[in-house]
Image: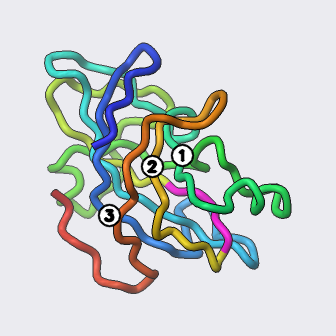
Amino acid sequence: MLSVKAGPYPHSVQIVDALLSPDAPQSPAPQGLTHVQLLLKVTSTPGRPMKAPHPKAYWVVLYNGCEAAQKTQHRISCAGMDGGTEYFTAEQMRSDDYTNGEYNGFGDLQADTPYWIRAWQLVPENVDLSRAQLCEGVRQGAPDNCIPLGTVRQDGAQNPTAG
């Protein structure tokens, strides 16, 4: 679990699922690129509500060769994720209606309530994510707060149960 301490709203992030797919909710990946998509479970400091962290500002997927890929493809970021859905409670995740989540641009999240969010980042199609990590957003220098991404499924592979 990634414990993000920076900023006014400390929180924990657990990777529930990781998937490589050219499709993402906001737009398909351009030729030669794909998205690494994460299903993340986010919780606040116990007993405290928080503002929803935006994926671009708080987390990043780092992998070997990111900086080199960024130099050849301007759409690749090594500093933050590209986007994310709204935040959803467990009840909302079990329903087919994804219209009532909390906005990821600092909507209010209740205390002691886990939330789920899908977040994504563009990567080269042939990327090796075997040693990739989810890190606290990189503002300056090398990240020092990271967790392994774990197994990354290919588009079409069976989705594990969110937990």
Label 1 is placed on what type of residue? Val
Image point 35% across, 85% down: which residue? Answer: 157
Give the residue number, with chain letter if any, for mark 1: 60
Label 3 is placed on what type of residue? Asp
Image point 62% across, 72% down: which residue? Answer: 34
Q: Position of residue 72 (x, y in %)?
A: 85, 63
Label 2 is placed on what type of residue? Leu
Asked if residue 135 lies left or right of residue 162, the reply is right
Q: Is residue 121 magenta?
A: yes
Along the viewing direction, whichever of 147 and 75 lies nearer the viewer? 147
Q: Which residues are magenta?
A: 120-124
Distance of label 1 from label 3 (alpha carbons): 15 Å
Along the viewing direction, whichever of 45 and 116 lies nearer the viewer? 45
- Residue 17 numbered mark, or none: 3
> From the image, which quarter does the C terminus lie in?
bottom left
The residue mark sitting in front, 3 or 2, is 2
Q: Are marks 3 and 2 in contact (CB under 8 Å)?
A: no
Image position of 146 with respect to 21: above or below: above
Along the viewing direction, whichever of 47 and 105 lies nearer the viewer? 47
- Residue 101 numbered mark, or none: none
Distance of label 2 from label 1 (alpha carbons): 6 Å
Q: Residues within 10 Å of mark 2 (few under 14, many from 20)?
A: many
Q: Which structural element holds mark 1?
A: strand
The image quadrant that residue 138 belongs to is top right
> From the image, which quarter does the N terminus lie in?
top left
- Residue 134 numbered mark, or none: 2
Q: Is residue 78 magenta?
A: no
Q: Which structural element holds mark 2?
A: strand
Q: Residues within 10 Å of mark 3 (few under 14, many from 20)?
A: many
Q: Are marks 2 and 1 in contact (CB under 8 Å)?
A: yes
